[in-house]
Image (cartoon, helix red, strand yellow):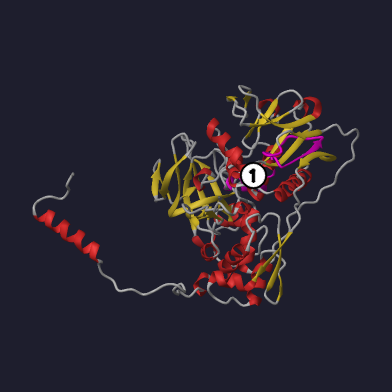
Amino acid sequence: MIAPLSWLREYVDIDCTPQELEEKLFSCGFEVENLEEVGARISRVVVGLATSCEPIEGTHLHLCEVDCGSEGKFQICCGADNVETGKKFPTALVGATVCETNKERTEIVGTATIQAGKLRGYDSFGMLCSGMELGLNEDLYPGAGYNGLLVLPDDAIPGADVKPIVGLDDWLFDIAITANRPDCQGIYGIAREVAAVLGKEMKPLPLSYREEKTEPHTLQVEVEAPQYCPRYEAHAVKDVKIAPSPAWLRRRLSLVGVSAISNMVDITNYVMLELGQPMHAFDRRDLAGDRIVVRTAKEGEKLVTLDEQELTLTESNLLICDGEKPVGLAGIMGGLNSEIKDTTTAVVFEAAKFARDNIRRSARALGKRTDASAHFEKGTDEYTVELAMKRALHLTEELGAGTVTDECAGKNTGNSIEKRPLTVSLARVNGVLGIEVPGEAVCRILANLDMEPELEGDALRLKIPAYREDMESYQDVAEEVIRFYGYEHIVPSFLKSAEVTSGGLNERQRRELKLKETLAGGGMYEAIH
């Protein structure tokens, strides 16, 4: 998964370099497969103030005088239609590197180095840049999508590096998530690990929202296949105003490769990326009978998904239906018949836990693997279902996208989402590790992981967060302790029953070697009997 450093800093005070954080993540069991600066291809691009701008007769070009502060003043020829005296633009100095675009300026094809040259007989020492030439789009930085120069803020200082101004100084961590840690499929889960390894406090996730009372409550949820759906929650939002999401949200989605669509759809994608819990939003008008039914498909039943593909289903596929028809393929993709539209005025949010094996089989059989199915295949927990719903409702209110009502419905199999007790022997934990980790260090590590440790003699009592479904025994506790205590503390040693033996071949191996040498001497390397 991709974790932007700026997003992680939303929850943890990170006071080390990206490279140091990469090492710390590796030390606690998370391999960073790639660490990349967002603006890695951009260098020597500064803020330039156009102090003069004169048209070159008979051309579309302008001859500009650009003040780049401590870097100096430069004459630059520019063909953009929005170049203007008094405005500030990204200015690539001679020797700078920028993104190279195709002739239509629709995509980036490589990297270009800026050189001094002549245009229509005029010397030009540098280049004024568009957003695309900096590797930006409209979601990453407002105004970057315009096919012209990127206009910088009025308070930008001439000569200053442009990267921090437009967010190109951010870093992306591509982190491999192991199968036993589905709680780390989202930014917030990785942030918990970062907080633990840095010994920092975790900033709380904003979850508050106000509910408006509504009558009557007609929304119903029925789960006919609880073995495949142990928890399902639905919550209604009214007075929905479909609009573009704010710049900060669009930027975060874009950093991890997700295109912004509209506020309500973006909220569901944002929550999935942040918490690792896929969500969906239905247009409430399209839910016949105001009902949601979770059931297995009938043999041959059909559904047209959001990507406009018609699927023929089997009894092994799990469906989300309304009172009459299927409206979504559970855990994989919503149906086209209930999608969010520009005219949507009421929405029902869905958050659920689906059985990973069922989602995996359906995605493979139907050839329909999505970001949502990838998360469900690795596993989600019931605690995060509730957390994700609260987060989505908070964002709805924060973005002014609609009014959260008190109308909600859901079903669960009775599983608790509270912390569960676990008592283990400290001696057995140390026995697995083969070293003596001080009880004080054990408690500090587990406290950083929000397990509320209490050590009485040899008894280590813990309260395991509901999102840590992998924590079941003393072996799991030992793994948590050593990955933060440090594997370098483990001392290599023999097992108690091990013996040191002399090297060499035994009698049977000597006979086999002699036979091979004899056959090889006769020109034979293989014999068939």
Q: Which residue does the image show at 16% across and 61% down from the upper left?
A: 514
Q: Which residues are magenta?
A: 226-255
Q: Which residue does the image show at 66% across and 67% down from the upper left?
A: 424
Which sits in the foreground, 227 or 251? 227
Q: Is residue 449 above or below residue 117?
A: below
Q: Secondary structure at mark 1?
A: helix
Q: Amino acid at mark 1?
A: Arg
Q: Which residue does the image show at 66% across and 62% down from the upper left?
A: 12
* 35 falls in the magenta region: no
Whether residue 200 is visible, yes or no, is no
Measuring from the top left, give residue 261's x and y in whole percent. Answer: 65, 36
View extreme (left): residue: 522
Left or right, residue 419 beside residue 487: right
Image label count: 1
Q: Which residue is mark 1?
A: 250
Measuring from the top left, give residue 527's x and y in whole percent. Answer: 17, 47
* 234 falls in the magenta region: yes
Which quarter of the rendering shows the C terminus?
A: top left
Left or right, residue 35 beside residue 220: left
Measuring from the top left, give residue 234's x and y in whole percent. Answer: 77, 38
